[in-house]
Amino acid sequence: MLERKIYQDLLNWKKNKNKKSLIVKGARQVGKTYIIDKFCRENYKNYVAINFFENDEYASIFDGGLDVDNIIKRLTIIIPDINLVPNETIIFLDEIQECPRAITALKFLTMDARFDVIASGSLLGLNYRDEVPSYPVGYVEHLEMHSMDFEEFCIANGMNKDALVYLKEYFDKLETIPDSIHNKMMELFKEYIIVGGMPAVVSEFVNSHNFINVLKIQKDIIEDYKMDIGKYAKESEKAKIRDCFLSIPKHLSKDYKKFRYNLVSSGGKAEKYQGSLQWLYDANIINFCYNLSTPSLPFEGNAKSDVFKVYMRDTGLLMAMLEDGSAKEVLNGNLGIYKGAIYENVIGDIFAKLGKKLYYFEHNSTIEMDFFIRYDDCAVAIEVKSADNTKSKSMRSIIDKWGVKKGFKLSSKNIGISDNVISIPLYMAIFL
């Protein structure tokens, strides 16, 4: 059984006496159905599950009038053995993107308030279905679900939660971590890079520790993503979205990782592919990392909207898109042409799962800082190193010449401090 942090968010939603219907959004196969089903079974006396993808007939429940009494009548006809008890029942509308009228009905179910309602679906469907008659703005809450983060991965692999609390004490005090703990955490972190956080993949790894089986499941998920592009994207966009998706490893193999449309296709330009990238972002497949005109707050105001890097949201899926043997190279610390990009990708994914937007700084092709984050209400530089050599002219220049007060270097090395630069192991990015 995989423990997910979002379960507590669902419990908090249930406690709210003035709750709205809840939509849990996220990419396919991040575990939405599993965790919502578990939550409903464990916290309600009566539970009605409706999966629109598995049973086309369920869509007819929302034909005709959408007042709740009519919905109840049709529910009891289609599912005659259900028990709808006011204030004791939850209705789970799974794959709701397949039934646009059910999305509209959330307004009336919220207003009626006899039953708690959770809906879930992929962003692919929720953002790109034009058929929704009227989106229930103001009557729904949203919760975004990601693939498993590194802490969840550690717990799935047998680590006690108290051990993570214990580890954070070293970060808070900036004390050297015992080698036995540090080496174990680095081993887990490298495994997380390869496996990623897709629950089916993590479950296979925990049960078998077989990277061949892991890779097969990852490749199946990538094929499912391609199929979703074909299903949900507009006909004129399908090929372009697919080309952008498949070009991500090519971009990360370059020293200069800014996204370049001409790497997608010869002569490619922003006007051709900009919408395709946005589609992949809305589908929770990629992260944007925007270049800052100056490394200072507010980041949003200093970001260049047309200069950015693209990272995969799940680094395990990125690894599955690379050539055979890449996983072995990560375990051995030899990343070949991808150099530090894989480590940048996983750190970007960690920050995004912490709710941070991603930014970097590059100046005249001579100074580049991998990330900037708001930390302790300051603009803090983050440099990601894949090798033990952590010397950096860019970090020193950023602090000396650009007014940045603090920086973190993330590498495989233990904790250390030099002036305003704090070196921490890569896995401690979860504490930033």
Image (cartoon, grey):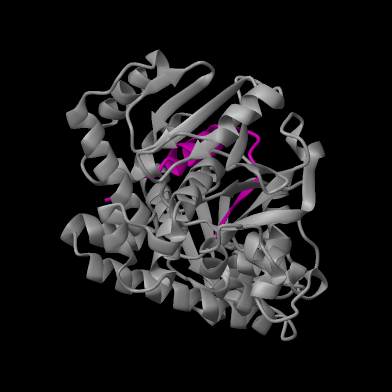
Residue 63 versus residue 370 in the image, above or below: below
Residue 404, horizontal then vertical, whole percent = 66, 24
The reply to whether residue 294 is in sight is yes
Where are the magenta residues, as a range?
1-26
Residue at coordinates 69% horizontally, 66% vertically from top-left? Answer: 260
Residue 63 position within the rendered picture, expressed as x and y whole percent measured from the top left: 69, 75
When the figure is inspected, residue 164 is found, relative to residue 246, above or below; the finding is above
Using residue 385 as the reference point, say whether residue 204 is left or right of it: left
Give whichever of 350, 304 is nearer the camera: 304
Asked whether residue 189 is drawn in magenta, I would say no
Give residue 94's position: percent from left, percent from top. 52, 64
In the image, what residue occupies the spot 32% across and 56% down?
334
Residue 416's quadrant in the figure?
A: top left
Q: Is residue 19 magenta?
A: yes
Q: Nearer the viewer, residue 301 or 9?
A: 301
Residue at position x 58%, y 52% in the image:
117
Residue 159 visible (yes or no): no
With respect to residue 169, does 60 lie above or below? below
**In the foreground, 353 or 271:** 271
Across and down, in percent, residue 394 comes to 59, 36
